[in-house]
Image (spheres, rainbow, N blue to C red):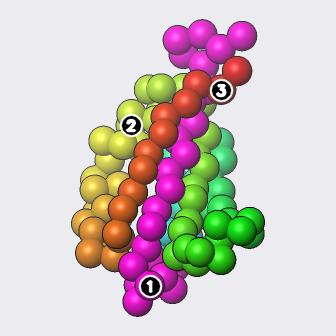
Amino acid sequence: MNEAMGEIANVTEYDVKPEHREDFEALLRDHAERTLRVEPGCLRFDILLPRDASAEKNPTRILLYELYRDEAEYRAHTDSDRLANFREAYKDMLADRRIMLVDVT
C-alpha cells in the first residue's frame, strides 16, 4: 500500500574508527533525540548495535534506522542545517558509511 507519498526509511551503517567509538555513539544519540523532538515527520529513530558474530570482528559498527512519514519529511531532514552540522562533527570519526533508503510497505 506504499504509494509515492508513503513511509520511507533510512538504514545507515557506520564503521567508526576505534578511537572515536564512544564519542560517535554519544553524538549519534544526541542527534537521534533532537531529530525526534524537532521533526514531527520523523516517526522513529533507532540506534542499532550488532550482536551477531560480525560484531566480534568489527565492534565499531553502528547502524541506525530512521522512519519518516513520507519522502518530503525525509528530504526536509536531509536538507537541514542540523544534519549538515552533525555530519561535519563526525566526519573524522568514520572509516566508512553506507546509506540505504527504502520504501516501507
- Answer whether labels 3 and 1 touch (C-beta < 8 Å): no
**Residue 42 or 101: which is nearer the viewer?**
101
Location of residue 47 in the rendering, given as x and y in whole percent from the top left corner: 62, 62
Judge left or right: residue 18 versus residue 103.
left
Which badge, 2 or 3, is on the more N-terminal residue?
A: 2
- Classify mark 3: residues with Cα within 10 Å, few (<14), some (14-19) or many (20+): some
* Location of mark 3 (residue): 104
Residue type highlighted by circle 1: Pro
Quadrant containing the N terminus is top right
Location of residue 25 in the rendering, given as x and y in whole percent from the top left corner: 52, 76
Q: CA distance from mark 1 to mark 2?
A: 32 Å
Residue type highlighted by circle 3: Val
Residue 8 in view in this figure: yes
Q: Secondary structure at mark 3?
A: loop
Residue 37 in view in this figure: no
Q: Residue at x 36, y 62 (%)?
A: 96
* Location of mark 1 (residue): 18
* Location of mark 2 (residue): 76
Q: CA distance from mark 2 to mark 3?
A: 18 Å
Q: CA distance from mark 3 to mark 1?
A: 33 Å
From this view, report whether residue 96 is shown above or below residue 2.
below
Q: Nearer the viewer, mark 2 or mark 3?
A: 3
Q: Nearer the viewer, mark 3 or mark 1?
A: 1
Q: Which residues are magenta?
A: 1-26
Q: Residue at x 58, y 25 (%)?
A: 103
* Magenta residue check for 100: no
Q: Residue furthest bottom?
A: 19
Q: Secondary structure at mark 1?
A: helix
